[in-house]
Image (tube, rainbow, N blue to C red):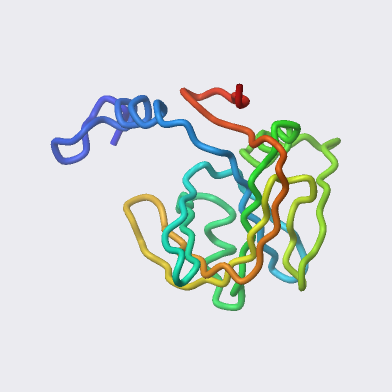
Amino acid sequence: MTDAQPASGGLTPFEFRQTLGRFASGVTVVTATDGQERRGMTANAFVSVSLEPPLILVSVDARAHMHALLAEERVTHFGVNVLSTAQRPLSEHFAGKPDPGQLVPWFDHEGLPLIGGSVAQLVCRKHQVIPAGDHTLYLGFVEYSRYTDDDPLLYFRGQYHELG
């Protein structure tokens, strides 16, 4: 399917992306490890699902390296790091534009890599895995969180923004 061909009578991928780009979102980096290497992936497809129990959802492209990592049975947890306005370079780094000189402020929480300086960090146990088109939805049970009152990095119409 190309951007010019609609999916089963629906919108073309280009139309869909342009329309949903009008929804402002925060920017997160999903993190996990295979026990040897830390990995991160920028994601703005993140949502709170439930307060009781505390559940969140992230959507991961099936072609992403993070998808292969999260699909492993031995990977039981993942992190979600809500980036601050000062962390735009990290967003770009983990969005497929790696900067070899980028220093990632990693820290571990019980063996799970998280990103220091983020507005919030969540430690999630994989709760449910839901195939959804060209993505997989990972429902996470939040076991731990921490947060600050710093301003978040926002994404709107394909560009980064700040509050105010």
Image coordinates of residue 80 in percent, x first then y, are 62, 55
- Seen from the viewer's position, the closer of residues 155 and 99 is 155
Instruction: Find the residue positioned furthest to the left.
Output: 9
- Seen from the viewer's position, the closer of residues 144 and 31 is 144
Image coordinates of residue 157 in percent, x first then y, are 46, 23
Q: Is residue 69 above or below residue 76?
A: above
Q: Quadrant of the C terminus?
A: top right
- Seen from the viewer's position, the closer of residues 59 and 24 is 24
Image coordinates of residue 155 in percent, x first then y, are 54, 30
Q: Residue at x 48, y 52 (%)?
A: 60
Q: Is residue 4 above or below residue 81?
A: above
Q: Give left or right: position of 148 versus 22.
A: right
Q: Residue at x 46, y 58 (%)?
A: 57
The picture quadrant where one finds residue 111 is bottom right
Q: Residue at x 58, y 39 (%)?
A: 27
Q: Residue at x 36, y 61 (%)?
A: 131
Give the mark count. Answer: 0
Q: Is residue 129 above or below residue 88?
A: below
The picture quadrant where one finds residue 2 is top left
Q: Give left or right: position of 97 versus 157.
A: right
Q: Is residue 117 above or below residue 34?
A: above
Image coordinates of residue 33 in percent, x first then y, are 70, 65
Q: Quadrant of the N terminus?
A: top left
Q: Give left or right: position of 102 versus 12.
A: right
Instruction: Find the residue positioned furthest to the bottom.
Output: 74
- Seen from the viewer's position, the closer of residues 161 and 20 is 161
